[in-house]
Image (cartoon, rainbow, N blue to C red):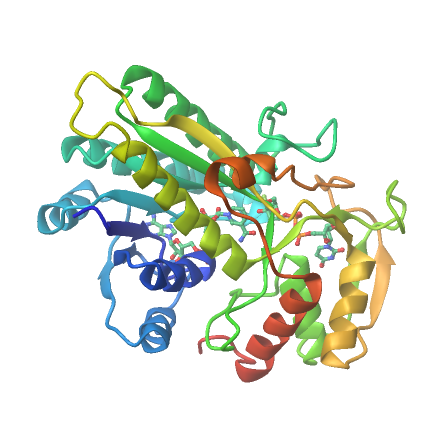
Amino acid sequence: MKNKILVTGGAGYIGSHTCIALHQAGYEIVVYDNLSNSSREAINRVSHLIGAPIEFIKGDIRDAKALRQVFDAHQFFGVIHFAGLKAVGESVAKPLLYYNNNVSGTITLLEVMTEYDVKNLVFSSSATVYGDPETLPIDETAPRSCTNPYGQSKLTVEHILEDLAVSDTSWSLISLRYFNPVGAHPSGQIGEDPNDIPNNLMPYISQVAVGKLEKLSIFGNDYPTVDGTGVRDFIHVTDLAQGHVSALNYLDKQLSLNEGDTTQQNSVGFLPINLGTGKGTSVLELVSAFSEVSRQAIPYQFTGRRAGDIASCYASVSSAKDLLGWEAKLSITDMCQDTWRWQIANPNGYN
Ligand code: NAD
Ligand code: UFG
């Protein structure tokens, strides 16, 4: 089936939003997730929002036997591979867990895909692979380096995908490098549900605004930026979700060129693409936008820089535009509004 997609990690934050976008674009989806960082309730809500059941399989990407059962039961056009662990601090404390889950898990998935001759993959990479960028905006040819095991796991998978594309030209491997995904579905029904105290800025701000946390610590006000605080390229998760649909549509179009002509090779090999807005927003600008939207004071204090943080990071978005025909549409205000709607409707996340 040309429109059937396996979504690993589809119960998670970005995966759940992407399931909605895929369904709306006419793709049939099967979600495979071990629920290590997500809730079955997210899938129930996605199903409710699209008005159709979702085939959900609880399983681990490191479990080849379980994956084979899924590939036996379905004929996939490709895989969108979100499954992975993503907490930078935890990765420093538990590097083996991160390499095992993110790298070994991806190798197992790729091996099973090879067995079933499913050779189209969209991988969740990250702007973290650029390390501390030399120039801004960052384009896909920028040098890559990472300083923590999480980032290393993403970079290692990218290297594996590159080698795989060289070894066998029938693979199409799109590595989407996300900048800073934030926001929630406009319904307020699904969103980001951090387990403990959030590490990332937007969920932290929204928990301060709702009164769950007392005050935001801003990590550094002496960066060479507009106001001394860190600058990031925040991208609305529904725009990001749409980027995955555009990547699949692109693959479909490329693979259909010269269809039936066995002398032509249409696969795209390894293709890295940034998904961001191309605009930088500082921590203080985001705090101010959130405060305005929520009409809540957001108390903060400046503390020292967080180890490993960089001053500024924003994407060159021309590859996404030129190749995928995709552009982010939503503003910082939209991102804050949708985060706030999700936060007040679900003060305890999916619990
Ligand atoms: P998330 O934790 O909400 O979603 C990841 C999902 O994968 C979860 O549902 C989790 O249960 C599942 N999972 C983890 N390990 C698994 C395994 N071994 N087998 C099966 N399922 C497994 O995270 P997210 O924010 O939705 O991120 C999705 C992907 O995008 C991740 O790979 C992440 O590293 C990457 N990414 C995220 C961000 C971000 O800021 N959110 C930025 C760049 C890249
Ligand atoms: N920040 C604070 N206080 C907080 C949290 C964050 O001041 O409580 C600041 C950070 O110092 C940084 C900015 O807010 O300047 C953004 O921080 P986030 O933790 O939200 O995001 P990062 O850019 O550090 O990292 C995120 C993901 C990584 C991913 C990277 C690039 O957490 O996994 O984007 O995609 F690799």
The count of marks equals: 0
Rendered-image quadrant of the C terminus: bottom left
Q: Residue at x 40, y 51 (%)?
A: 245
Left or right of 38: which side holds 290?
Answer: right
**Is residue 135 visible in the rendered structure shown here?**
yes
Q: Nearer the viewer, residue 244 or 74?
A: 244
User: Is 308 in front, or is 281?
Assistant: 281
In the rendered image, the vertical position of residue 224 relative to residue 11, given as above or below: above
In the displayed structure, 78 sits above or below 245; it is above
Residue 292: x %, y % from top left: 78, 75
Q: Residue at image x 74%, y 26%?
A: 134
> Would you say residue 105 is visible in this rendering?
no
Left or right: 273, with 283 as reference point:
left
Query: Measuring 58% from the left and 45% from the top, which residue is drawn there?
Result: 88
Tell me: residue 114, above or below residue 192: above
- When asked about the image quadrant of residue 56, the answer is bottom left
The x, y position of residue 240, in whole percent, is 51, 53
Please state which of residues 186 and 148 is positioned toward the viewer in this rendering.
Answer: 186
Q: Is residue 40 left or right of residue 216?
A: left
Q: Position of residue 21 (x, y in %)?
A: 40, 61
Q: Position of residue 49 (x, y in %)?
A: 37, 76
Q: Quadrant of residue 111?
A: top left
